[in-house]
């Protein structure tokens, strides 16, 4: 189903995540005539895509002839304080502000908006760039069912979407899925290094590690089985996998490390939001 909007969509920030979203929207049939991109310096790749679809690009905010139905905020968190106040001036009663900026709670947007403007905070992750992201979203009390549905369609263009009612959960969401791809990439990195240390040529070790992690992820995605069941299906009693899991599942093994890693990321997310 093509994405339908009641008015213009203003995308502020066409970096990695903004461009991934835009690509997904266009693939889902969003009319490029409804899109305006605000970015002072889009990369040549982004500019080529925008030009190919006839999408208007603006270096800075200025009034629209029709109030935006959606303002998607995809600027880097470190420039948010300077970038968002001018954007807020463009929002009207029927506008929903959809933020994919990490670490910025809803209240930071509400502080610059007129009373009653809808705000949705979303946390996508980098697999959105290949249409396999997972996004968790939460809205303020002003988000209407229609606005939530619009945001859901926009986010679903790059993967799966889950909604929560408690914004406090977003710190743990950031720690698990927002930062999670880096954990998986590090797993592949460590697996390749261990393979090379075991005697494999480094290039072959990297190939085996990358394909194993990617293939296992795809199997997990397609299967109806729980990860624990898939793990058990690979593990023969007293076999090679069993021997490896005795290390990974030991007292100071992967479970403890992952728990500590997620806790550290969640703690840092809370610090950044203050």
Image: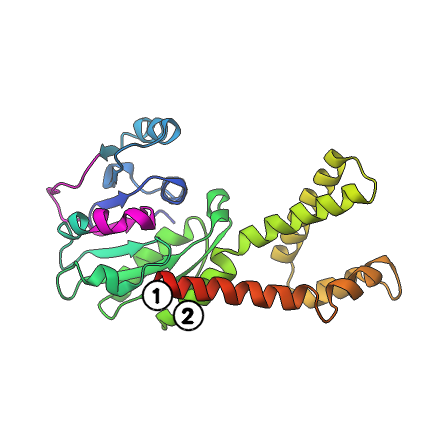
Q: Is residue 116 left or right of residue 190?
A: left
Say if 133 sits above or below 247 in the image.
Answer: above
Tag shown at residue 243: none
Residue 121 on the magenta span: no
Residue 82 on the magenta span: yes
The x, y position of residue 47, in whole percent, is 33, 28
- Mark 1 packing: few (<14 Cα in 10 Å), some, or many (20+)? many
The x, y position of residue 15, in whole percent, is 37, 40
- The residue at which mark 2 appears reads as 169
Q: Which residues are magenta?
A: 59-84
The x, y position of residue 270, in whole percent, is 39, 66
Tag shown at residue 138: 1
Any part of residue 57 in sight? yes
Q: Residue at x 35, y 47 (%)?
A: 2
Q: Is residue 246 left or right of residue 263?
A: right
Disc nearer the start of the sequence (2/1): 1
The quadrant holding residue 12 is: top left
Looking at the picture, tell me which residue is in the foreground, 234 or 188.
Answer: 188
Looking at the picture, tell me which residue is in the foreground, 161 or 252.
Answer: 252
């Amino acid at each position: 189903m093509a994405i339908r909007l009641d008015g213009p969509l203003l995308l502020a920030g066409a970096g990695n995540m903004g461009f991934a979203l835009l690509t997904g929207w266009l693939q889902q049939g969003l009319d490029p005539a409804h899109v305006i991109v605000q970015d002072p310096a889009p990369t040549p790749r982004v500019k080529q895509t925008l030009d190919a679809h006839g999408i208007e690009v603006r270096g800075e905010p200025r009034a629209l002839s029709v109030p935006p139905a959606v303002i998607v905020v995809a600027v880097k968190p470190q420039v948010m304080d300077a970038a968002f106040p001018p954007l807020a001036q463009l929002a009207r009663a029927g506008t929903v502000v959809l933020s994919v900026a990490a670490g910025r709670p809803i209240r930071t947007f509400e502080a610059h908006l007129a009373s009653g403007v809808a705000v949705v905070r979303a946390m996508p992750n980098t697999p959105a760039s290949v249409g396999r992201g997972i996004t968790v979203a939460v809205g303020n009390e002003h988000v209407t069912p229609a606005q939530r549905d619009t945001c859901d369609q926009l986010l679903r263009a790059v993967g799966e979407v889950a909604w929560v009612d408690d914004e406090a959960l977003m710190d743990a969401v950031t720690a698990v899925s927002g930062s999670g791809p880096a954990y998986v990439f590090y797993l592949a990195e460590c697996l390749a290094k261990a393979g090379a240390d075991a005697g494999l040529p480094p290039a072959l070790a990297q190939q085996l590690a990358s394909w194993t992690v990617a293939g296992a992820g795809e199997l997990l995605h397609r299967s109806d089985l729980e990860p624990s069941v898939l793990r058990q299906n690979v593990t023969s009693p007293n076999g090679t996998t069993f021997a490896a899991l005795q290390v990974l599942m030991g007292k100071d093994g992967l479970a403890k490390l992952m728990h500590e890693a997620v806790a550290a990321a969640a703690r840092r997310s809370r610090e950044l939001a203050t």
